[in-house]
Every structure is written in C-alpha cells, then in structure tokens.
Amino acid sequence: MEIVLATRNKKKIEEIRRITGDLPITILSLENFPDCPETVEDRDTSRQCNKKAVEVCRCTGKPALADDSGLEVDALGGAPGVYSARYAGATGNTSDVLNYQKLLSELRNVITEKRGAQFRVLHGPRIS
C-alpha cells in the first residue's frame, strides 16, 4: 500500500518513514508528485490538516495523510505553533538556527518560570 504525506518537509518525511519502516506500506510525499499544487492555508489548524489530506488525495489518487505540528510557547500566546519551521521567515534545514534565535530573542525578557511550552501535533485523516 502507498500513502502520500501531504508535505514537502524533508525532516517530516524522514521521520514518518523511520516510524513506519517496519510496516508493509510505502511512504510517498509531494516530492513524488511535483505537479500537486500547494494547499492554500486559510483554515484553522485542524481543518487545514483535513483540507491538505483531501486535496493531495484528489491530486494523486492515493490515500493521503497530513500533519501540522509545532512548539506552542505559553508566554507568546501559543506562537510559533504550526509556523515553527518558518518562524524566522526562512525555510529549509538552514533556518533552524534562525528560528531558535528568534524564539530566544522574543523570550529574553520572560523569566524562566514563565517559559512553559508544549509540542502539539495534529493529523488530518487518511483519505482514500
């Protein structure tokens, strides 16, 4: 069975492939379907996951799985949230340091006890 991840995020693809490595499935991604358009992000996070999965399923004709995840920092009102990977405006692996620097810069005046955070993952349903 083939399942398409509704993402081009190389880290996310690698992680899902590692987690599912022992299962009898093949994990594909949008890299395998370069003609699939980007999903317009115009909904709240949970509904956005559903929208991504449905659009990718329609484009590829294969079951699709979408996920949005991110670090939610209490003192920042839940930011950066699902925008964690592009928080500093850059994209790709080289932006990790920039994202960390921006986050720490925004927390510079927040005392340690007020720096609570959680990592939240939302999944859109697999659509077939």
Image: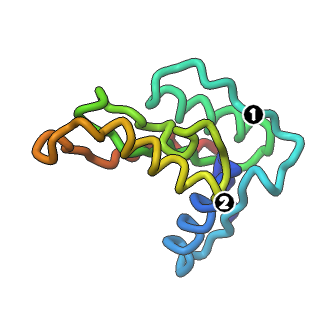
Q: Position of residue 104 (x, y in %)?
A: 36, 46
Q: Residue at x 49, y 26 (%)?
A: 47
Label 2 and label 1: CA atoms lie apart by 15 Å
| Disc 1 target residue | 38
Up/down of 96 relative to 104, above or below: below
- The disc, 2 or 1, on the residue closer to the chain's N-terminal end is 2
| Disc 2 target residue | 10
- In this view, the mark in front (2 or 1): 2
Quick one: which residue is furthest to the front in this view?
109
Q: Position of residue 117 (x, y in %)?
A: 25, 45
Helix or strand or loop: what does disc 2 sit on? helix
Badge 2: few (under 14), some or many (20 or more) residues near its Cα, within 10 Å? few
Q: Residue at x 65, y 53 (%)?
A: 9
- Whether residue 1 is visible, yes or no, is yes
Q: Residue at x 60, y 42 (%)?
A: 127
Horizontal arrangement in the rendering, residue 36 relative to residue 125 (left or right): right
Identified by mark 1, the residue type is: Glu
Helix or strand or loop: what does disc 1 sit on? loop
Tell me the quadrant of the picture where the N terminus can be found: bottom right
Quick one: which residue is furthest to the right in this view?
35
Identified by mark 2, the residue type is: Lys
In this orientation, which residue lies closer to the viewer: 108 or 124?
Answer: 108
Q: Residue at x 69, y 30 (%)?
A: 39
Q: Position of residue 45 (x, y in %)?
A: 46, 29
Badge 1: few (under 14), some or many (20 or more) residues near its Cα, within 10 Å? some
Q: Position of residue 69 (x, y in %)?
A: 45, 45
Q: Are marks 2 and 1 in contact (CB under 8 Å)?
A: no
